[in-house]
Amino acid sequence: MAAPSSPASPLFLREAEIRRGIELLHFGYGRLLAAIDARLATEGLGRAHHRALYFVARQPDLTVSALLGLLGITKQSLGRVINELTTRGLIEARVGRDDRRQRLLRLTATGAAFESELFETLRARLSAAYVEAGPAAVAGFWLVLEGLVPPEERPMLAKLRG
């Protein structure tokens, strides 16, 4: 396990340490996603499209309303993303089994292959960082990130683990 560039201060709640955490989140997340931005751009897609593909891949037959809750974007924005992904043959929307007003989202074979390609790029980057940090650091990182999610929204995380 590699030593961190500088260990956490025992005074980790001071402003300087909080600012460092915010900066690391900002730059780490930005660099992680930058790894797939060029590939998305070749298809004329962006990060919102990727997020939709990712969560539909995680939960086939996800309802539009559930995806709306996961992404936290407006219904209008999600509608544009879904329409574009459907038009490009990456996702399909089916009528709900119990409620015909529901639209159930599922990746097409083309969509699954594209999402898998994007995921593999992200997996490689994140895996390398995990190996460098070690298992204890990864577990701590997960706890911190989960702590940023309000308690009433944490059941959503549990559903994704399944």
Image: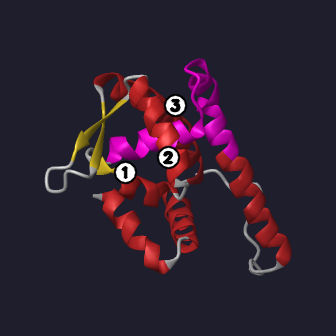
Q: Secondary structure at mark 1?
A: helix
Q: Secondary structure at mark 3?
A: helix
Residue 115 x/y as whole percent: 42, 31
Q: Nearer the viewer, residue 142 or 77?
A: 77
- Compared to residue 50, the image places residue 150 above or below, namely below
Q: Which residue is drawn at the image coordinates 37% and 71% (left, top)?
A: 155
126 to the left or right of 26: left
Q: Which residues are magenta?
A: 30-58
Comes first in the chain, label 3 or label 2 = 2
Q: Which residue is drawn at the image coordinates 79% and 71% (left, top)?
A: 17
Outermost left residue: 98
Q: Magenta residues: mostly which secondary structure?
A: helix
Going by the numbered disc 3, the residue's amino acid type is Thr
70 to the left or right of 62: right
Q: Nearer the viewer, residue 1 or 160?
A: 160
- Compared to residue 149, the image places residue 14 above or below, namely below
Is 66 magenta? The answer is no
Residue 22 x/y as whole percent: 74, 63
Q: Nearer the viewer, mark 3 or mark 2?
A: 2
* Circles 2, 1 touching at the beta carbon (< 8 Å): yes
| Quadrant in the rendering for residue 15 | bottom right
Q: Which residue is drawn at the image coordinates 24% and 40% (left, top)?
A: 94
Q: How many neighbours does mark 2 have within 10 angstroms: few (below 14), some (14-19), or many (20 or more)?
A: many
The residue tagged 2 is 78
Is 50 magenta? The answer is yes
Q: Which mark is residue 64?
A: 1
Going by the numbered disc 1, the residue's amino acid type is Val
Q: How many neighbours does mark 1 have within 10 angstroms: few (below 14), some (14-19), or many (20 or more)?
A: some
Residue 39 x/y as whole percent: 58, 23
CA–CA distance between discs 2 and 1? 8 Å
CA–CA distance between discs 3 and 1? 26 Å
